Image (cartoon, helix red, strand yellow):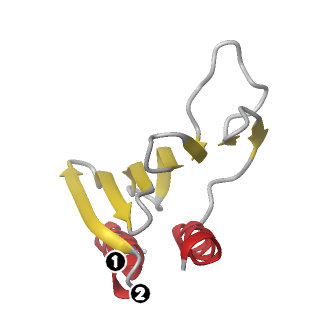
């Protein structure tokens, strides 16, 4: 998949939240860099006041590779619901890709497909407030 196709698919997946009436606002930014690289940042405010932050640094020289990423979902007061990322921790965790949960637990976790993440959020919103 080309970088432009990947970015278009990412934008389309995020806009799905608006299509289904779950987004109050979407701020999607992409910065293309030399060497088939890109930085994507998005902030999606949802109808229940929760916010999804998306950050990806992508290298697409040979294939789509997420060099670094973070998908943080928090409630309207800024309290973490969950975050997937590959940030290095000190002291080390013993694994790179991981998930933080609201109770402070960090577990190994592969980065979710954005479609899976969005579906999890939609289901949560429907169960809690709609």
Which quarter of the image is occupied by the N terminus?
bottom left
- Mark 2 sits on what residue? 20
Please tell me which residue is depicted at 47% across the width and 62% down the height of the picture.
63
Is disc 1 surrounded by few (<14), some (14 to 19) or many (20+) residues within 10 Å?
Answer: some
Question: How far apart are labels 2 and 1 at the CA level?
Answer: 9 Å
Q: Answer whether residue 126 is visible to the viewer in this image.
A: yes
Please tell me which residue is depicted at 63% across the width and 21% down the height of the picture.
89
Give coordinates of residue 102: x percent, y percent: 67, 41
Tell me, yes or no, whether the two marked residues, 2 and 1, touch with CB atoms within 8 Å: no
Give coordinates of residue 122: x percent, y percent: 55, 75
Task: Specify which label sits upstream in the sequence, 2 or 1.
Answer: 1
Give coordinates of residue 126: x percent, y percent: 58, 78
- Mark 1 sits on what residue? 15
Q: Which mark is residue 123?
A: none
The correct choice, above or below, for 1 with respect to 88 in the image is below
Quarter of image, res 117: bottom right
Q: Answer whether residue 9 is visible to the viewer in this image.
A: no
Which quarter of the image is occupied by the C terminus?
bottom right
Q: Residue furthest top?
A: 91
Is disc 2 surrounded by few (<14), some (14 to 19) or many (20+) residues within 10 Å?
Answer: few
The correct choice, above or below, for 23 with respect to 86 in the image is below
Q: Secondary structure at mark 2?
A: loop
Quarter of image, res 100: top right
């Amino acid at each position: 998949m080309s970088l432009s196709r990947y970015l278009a698919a990412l934008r389309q997946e995020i806009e799905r939240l608006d299509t289904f009436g779950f987004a109050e606002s979407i701020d999607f930014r992409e910065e293309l860099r030399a060497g088939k690289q890109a930085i994507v940042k998005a902030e999606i405010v949802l109808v229940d006041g929760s916010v999804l932050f998306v950050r990806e640094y992508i290298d697409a020289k040979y294939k789509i590779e997420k060099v670094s990423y973070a998908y943080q979902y928090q409630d309207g007061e800024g309290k973490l619901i969950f975050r997937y990322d590959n940030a290095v921790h000190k002291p080390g965790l013993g694994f790179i890709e991981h998930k933080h949960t609201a109770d402070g637990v960090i577990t190994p976790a592969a980065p979710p497909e954005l479609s899976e993440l969005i579906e999890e959020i939609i289901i949560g919103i429907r169960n809690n407030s709609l």
